[in-house]
Amino acid sequence: MAKLRLLYFLPALFFAVFTGKTTAQIYRPSAQTEERVLKLLDKMTLEEKIGQLTLYTTDWGSTGPTIREGYKNDIRSGACGNLFNSHTVGFVRDLQRIAVEETRLKIPLLFGFDVIHGYKTIFPIPLGEAASWDLEAIEKSARVASTEASAAGLNWTYAPMVDICRDPRWGRVMEGAGEDTYLGCRIAEARTHGIQGKKIGDTDAMLACVKHYAAYGAPTAGRDYNTVDMSERFFREYYLPPYEAAVRAGAATVMTSFNDYDGVPATGNKYLMTDILRKEWGFRGFVVTDYTSINEMVNHGVIANEKEAGELALNAGVDMDMQGAVFQRFLAQSVKEGKVSEIQIDEAVRRVLRLKFDLGLFENPYKFCDEAREKAELLSPAHRAAAREVARKSIVLLKNEKNVLPLKKNAKIALIGPLADNKAELIGNWNGAGNANDCVSVLEGVRAQAQQEVLYDSGCEFFVAKKAGVGPALELAKQADVVVVVVGEQAMMSGEAASRADISLPAVQEELVLELVRTGKPVVVVLMNGRPLAIPKIAENAPAILETWWLGTEAGNAIADVLFGAYNPSGKLPITFPRSAGQVPIFYNEKSTGRPYNPDSKWTSRYIDTPNSPQWPFGFGLSYTTFDIGVPKPDKTTFKKGESLQVTVNVTNTGKADGEEVVQLYVRDLVGSVTRPVKELKAFRKIMLKSGASTTLTFTLTERDLSFFRRDMTFGVEPGEYEIMVGSNSAELKRVKVLMTE
Ligand code: NOJ
């Protein structure tokens, strides 16, 4: 037993020695839990074991193509040990009662739900929150979501979603942290910590489920569920790290993805689930499939029927079947035929039971079912205040010619646009138990802070003109000092199964904005969307633009805070905004190529009809003040392999307002055994500086920060020259060179 235990810890030990970081937070069941699990396992029939590996949605809500009837009977017979899409204390309690009072072994159920950016108090969509570059705020958001959801009967959430995405056509880009691996890893950790709180088993915490493992964010052509194919080097370097970061931050469960990777569907992929996840990283929690993704392996064409798909999945490392009913229908037969062993089933069941014990469900199956707590927590004033705070931090100021913003409170404002007086879209997609009526609309938020009457007209519908046309809106614009026009996507235009080939604004909305600009009045465009939009005409013609994503329950207040300057915007884009969909995939950390871009030379890597540069680069965002970020100063220009490097940089707030800046540090390895990106984010710091104030920041770069997958696929550094770059976004950087010697 002792030997066995040591074996479990070996991968973690390896990581600690290799990286110099600790793995203290990785999920580990206690010896006591282990004993209880084994005792229970001894009493279980094969059918009861398979029941613990089965997860069904209730009819409360559906997040996939089918609802399975009769799930209550399945609970009763022990054939279904876990549920999702069932929440609120009353509903959960009734179902849990069936499990713990009417089944032979009284094993409590897990209750899962997609709590992606809030449960009842809705926070900004994850892509929006990522724009805050504020890890504490992001953790806080997940903490509030977990506190609320766990007060509503839930003990498991399908978050964090950490899929790196460089393709804004993909609708699910809204659920992640954008395009960058470093930022994505830090956010994956913050969200995991927020969801799981101080420890698994606390009444205000849930199990996290990192998803979608793996590389789901790189579907060919940006089309959801499509094939993913990339080199192992590319995969390990850019797509894999955020899953690992979440696992090392303690994420107790992992969800497989729908896509295939290198020809093998993720749900049947032993390399992903066993070799990397369990052996390399030492993951000890359980793996759940995505919705019917075992069954879908038949469509992928790698297996002839569902029974064999179940065998493939279990043998590859899946523990729990979400909604497919494949394990329930076929696994016992597969055991009889020797296609899967009962030992493997036992191992999967142990992984599930450990977490049920750790959650404390055996002591108190109703521990997340306390009506008084549910009433007190949901939409509490403190939670709404936190949502407003995160929401305003997520707003990105993209343009502000002639300082149109902030608005004077006594200005006469014409508030126009189909999203100006809207609540339904503000909670975005994957909005938990959020209720649009609880939202503050932009009109309400602006009216609450403006000192003059606010004129309002929707200007157009989402996709079509109004009967009256834009005339009434233009009339209001003419009467006003300034026009604020709120345009964008409907929430259902992004999220799952919502890829778009055209990522521009609906034409009627673009035309509305341009008509308003033509009035000659100063126009502030407030964008709401779940993905980067390509809006070159608006970018060129509108004097001021705010990217506000979908900000959730407090959207209107947060937007008003920024419009009137009660909050100085500090968000930075976590993803590149292209000029047109034709540039996609577009991302900042590209390679040089043998013919680097030169706008004056035909024979270079470029388009003939558009520049290579994006509309707005990764890391970009303005403020109502200005900052000067100095040249990076390394503590030594030559350093030895293994030594770390300290880089200092002076930052001054050179403008008239107090404000926050995100100081970003990028690195380039100038000559590598394989081609290296022209820049990669390696550190950042978000700081607050009073007008006129200066500070000096110190960044430490370790050997790990400079490591990559070398020609032979070992991970490490290669001595030579590096460029260190510092600035306020990925395109405006000051540089210095340093030399690493052997
Ligand atoms: C399918 C989605 O891909 C996944 O993200 C979600 O957690 C499940 N459905 C459950 O709703």
Image: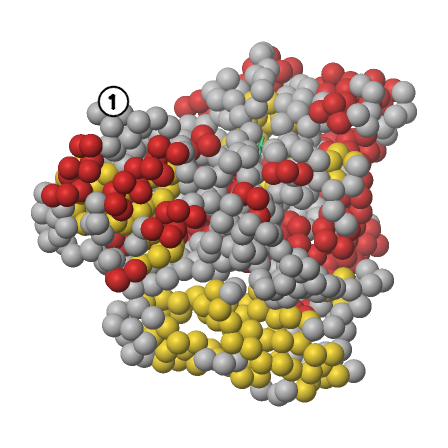
Q: Is residue 393 above or below residue 378?
A: below
Q: Is mark 1 within 8 Å of ligand 1?
A: no
In the image: residue 280, left or right of residue 450? right
Q: How is the image coloured?
A: secondary structure
User: What residue is rendered at 31% in x and 59% in y?
Assistant: 400
Q: State the residue in front, 605 or 164.
A: 605
Work out which residue is located at the far right of the displayed protein and give it: 338
In the image: residue 449, left or right of residue 600? left
- Please state the horizontal and vertical placement of residue 649, each as a whole percent of the image: 48, 80
Q: State the residue in front, 632 or 332.
A: 632
User: What residue is rendered at 11% in x and 53% in y?
Assistant: 410
Quarter of the rendered image showing ligand 1: top right
Q: Residues within 10 Å of mark 1 (few under 14, many from 20)?
A: few
- Disc 1 is placed on an element classified as loop
The quadrant in which residue 119 appears is top left
- Please state the horizontal and vertical placement of residue 299, each as a whole percent of the image: 74, 23
Residue 208 in view of the camera:
no
User: What residue is rendered at 48% in x and 22% in y?
Assistant: 61
Residue 648 in view of the camera:
yes
Q: Which residue is mark 1?
A: 467
Q: State the residue in front, 22 or 4.
A: 22
Q: Is residue 655 above or below residue 129?
A: below
User: What residue is rendered at 49% in x and 69% in y?
Assistant: 732
- Please state the horizontal and vertical placement of residue 240, each as a whole percent of the image: 68, 51
The quadrant in which residue 581 appears is top right
Q: Is residue 714 above or below residue 470?
A: below
How many marks on residues? 1
Identify the image quadrant of the C terminus. Answer: bottom right
Residue kind at label 1, given as amino acid type: Lys
- Please state the horizontal and vertical placement of residue 740, each as a whole percent of the image: 71, 81
